[in-house]
Image (spheres, grey):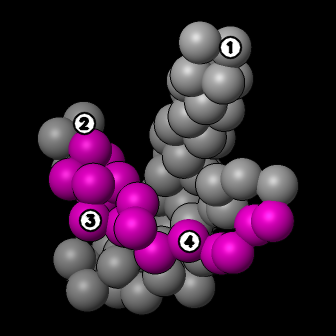
Amino acid sequence: MALYWRAFDDLRGDRMNDLGGLGAIWWSSIAAYADRIGIVGIDALERFVAIIKAMDGEYRDFAVKQAKRTQKK
């Protein structure tokens, strides 16, 4: 699990521009990172991408909730 947290931490700044808020991490960035750390095979890559995207989705949801809370104050 530490592998995924490290990857997410390294990748979280590499995002698409999104006018409505925090954009998603680029798929190409996740795939390049996977290649650099030695993830081999399409199944392993798809699993890695899915996990990082899921983590990113949770992070983005949290960021939206935090922003709404801040706006209410």
* Disc marking residue 15: 4
Depicted 4 relative to depicted 42: above or below: above
Q: Earlier in the sequence, mark 4 or mark 2?
A: 2
Residue 5, position as x, y percentages in the image: 26, 44
Gap between marks 2 and 3 measured at Cα: 14 Å
Mark 4: secondary structure: strand
Depicted 66 relative to depicted 73: above or below: below
Question: Which residue is label 1 attached to?
Answer: 72
Gap between marks 4 and 3 measured at Cα: 12 Å
Gap between marks 1 and 2 measured at Cα: 35 Å
In the figure, is residue 67 to the left or right of 17? left
Which contiguous range is marked in magenta?
4-19
Q: Earlier in the sequence, mark 3 or mark 1?
A: 3
Q: How many neighbours does mark 4 have within 10 angstroms: few (below 14), some (14-19), or many (20 or more)?
A: some
Q: How many neighbours does mark 1 have within 10 angstroms: few (below 14), some (14-19), or many (20 or more)?
A: few
Q: Earlier in the sequence, mark 1 or mark 2?
A: 2
Mark 3: secondary structure: helix
- The amino acid beneath tag 4 is Arg
Question: Which mark lies nearer to you, 1 or 2?
Answer: 1
Mark 2: secondary structure: loop
Gap between marks 3 and 1 measured at Cα: 31 Å
- The amino acid beneath tag 1 is Lys
Q: Earlier in the sequence, mark 2 or mark 3?
A: 2
Gap between marks 1 and 4 measured at Cα: 26 Å
Mark 1: secondary structure: helix
